[in-house]
């Protein structure tokens, strides 16, 4: 007996694999600094936790409607209308268990076998994985350090063909922390109109942009019925384990996504949806504090890494990752990541965990304490010096 062929297209996610290896070393008594996983180290704000327990006490423990609780969909629509400066109704919102299912459903809903899908490389591994699962043709769009881990719009245009069905964008970006300025978004929107393709805009880090305002493709003229906007609560409210995300979907695709959701999850956990309303409508102070803390950690980590000979690190404008260049060192990305885990006790990811164009880079998450970051820099510095 064999598993289905389509499973062969699915890729794993290195962050979880490296976490497993790091935990195994810890079980042997090793001290490990964890910079591999992309999750805030802050607790979920108390008022959000209280809203969940209150909702349980009030009996929000049954199924909700598949697309989500109407009051949460309305709250999300209000939030999106305010932050993206557009007018979106609750009927365009779908609530899902985390943002990730929306990447899965969104790609499955629009990609036919043989369709081409352009996606960022380096980029979140789920994109390529699900494109392959949907039997689409993955077309990597290289992000280059010279453009602060963005791409030239001409390079994107060169990848578009009459088979292009979908472009995936992620701004602010995992793993590089880069972002797309408004002028690039406008040029991309023109290409989408000219060549008639959908755009999946993964904006899960939209609230974690430190030096610039966030602009959304959805705000631009003509993008309303071709943009699938993905956002959620995991990163902004430190709610990764709660599993709560959402999408703003073109009206004509809502029933396709509803069917995919109905046939997999039925709905998102009902009392967690109530907590989502508290997150959006309650105090945003904790978000601001977290953003401030991340910004400070970013400065410390970037400065520390740049003092290590052979490592060069840009200051990324968003998310909570840095993506230092290690091309001057005598090991490749995977070799260096393994060496740093085994020799120095620092768990981080090779750039190649995010695609071939990640060779020559590492990804470090700074969603951990300053103390841990300082220890990581010291350990990396010593281990790298021992390589020469
Ligand atoms: N998109 C990107 C770019 C991410 O980095 C992540 C999580 O790491 C997700 C989506 C998934 O978010 P969630 O935990 O809400 O499923």
Image (tube, grey):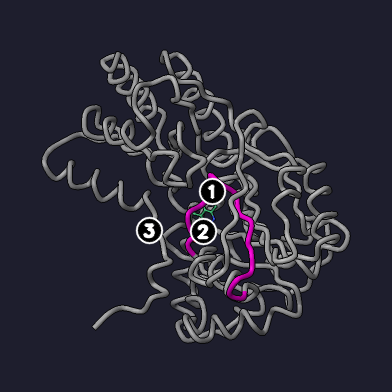
> Which residue range is magenta in the image?
112-129
Q: Residues within 10 Å of mark 2 (few under 14, many from 20)?
A: many
Residue 381 at what x, y percent from top left? 34, 18
Instruction: Locate residue 371 relative to residue 293 in the image: left or right.
Output: left
The quarter of the picture where residue 89 lies is bottom right
* Residue 291 higher or lower than 188, as above or below: above
In the structure shown, which secondary structural element does the residue marked by tag 3 occupy? Answer: loop
Residues 307 and 74: in front is 307
**Which residue does the image show at 36% across and 79% down from the upper left?**
4
Per the model, the C-alpha gap separating discs 3 and 2 is 11 Å
Mark 1 close to ligand 1, CB under 8 Å: yes
Q: Give the left or right position of residue 347, taking residue 140 as reference.
A: left
> Residue 65 location, x and y as percent?
58, 85
Quadrant holding the N terminus: bottom left
Note whether 192 is above or below 89 in the view shown.
above
- The circle drawn on residue 12 is 3
Relative to 129, residue 291 above or below: above
Magenta stretch encompasses residue 115: yes
Q: What residue is disc 2 on?
A: 128
User: How far across and how far down the image is residue 136, in percent?
Assistant: 57, 68
């Amino acid at each position: 007996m064999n598993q289905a062929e389509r499973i062969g297209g699915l890729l794993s996610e290195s962050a979880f694999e490296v976490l497993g290896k790091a935990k195994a070393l810890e079980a042997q008594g090793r001290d490990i600094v964890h910079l591999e996983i992309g999750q805030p180290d802050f607790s979920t704000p108390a008022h959000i936790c209280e809203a969940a327990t209150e909702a349980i006490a009030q009996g929000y423990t049954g199924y909700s409607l598949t697309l989500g609780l109407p009051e949460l969909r309305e709250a999300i629509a209000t939030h999106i209308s305010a932050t993206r400066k557009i007018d979106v109704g609750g009927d365009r919102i779908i609530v899902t268990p985390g943002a990730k299912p929306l990447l899965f459903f969104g790609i499955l809903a629009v990609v036919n076998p043989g369709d081409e899908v352009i996606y960022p490389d380096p980029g979140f591994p789920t994109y390529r994985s699900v494109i392959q699962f949907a039997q689409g043709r993955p077309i990597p769009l290289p992000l280059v350090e010279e453009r602060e881990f963005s791409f030239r719009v001409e390079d994107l245009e060169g990848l578009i063909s009459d088979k292009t069905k979908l472009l995936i964008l992620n701004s602010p970006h995992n793993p590089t922390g880069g972002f797309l300025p408004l002028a690039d978004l406008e040029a991309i929107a023109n290409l989408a109109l000219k060549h008639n393709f959908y755009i999946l805009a993964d904006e899960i880090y939209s609230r974690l942009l430190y030096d610039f305002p966030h602009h959304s493709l959805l705000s631009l003229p003509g993008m309303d019925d071709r943009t699938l906007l993905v956002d959620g609560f995991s990163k902004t409210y430190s709610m990764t384990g709660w599993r709560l995300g959402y999408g703003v979907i073109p009206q004509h695709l809502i029933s396709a996504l509803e069917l995919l959701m109905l046939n997999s999850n039925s709905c998102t956990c009902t009392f967690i949806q109530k907590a989502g309303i508290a997150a959006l409508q309650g105090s945003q102070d904790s978000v601001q504090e977290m953003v401030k803390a991340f910004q400070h950690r970013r400065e410390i980590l970037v400065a520390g890494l740049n003092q290590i000979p052979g490592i060069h690190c840009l200051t990324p404008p968003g998310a909570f990752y840095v993506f230092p260049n290690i091309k001057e060192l005598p090991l490749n990305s995977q070799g260096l990541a393994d060496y740093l885990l085994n020799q120095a006790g620092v768990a981080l990811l090779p750039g190649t965990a995010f695609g071939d164009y990640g060779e020559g880079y590492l990804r470090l998450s700074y969603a951990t304490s300053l103390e841990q970051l300082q220890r990581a820099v010291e350990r990396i510095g010593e281990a790298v010096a021992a390589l020469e």
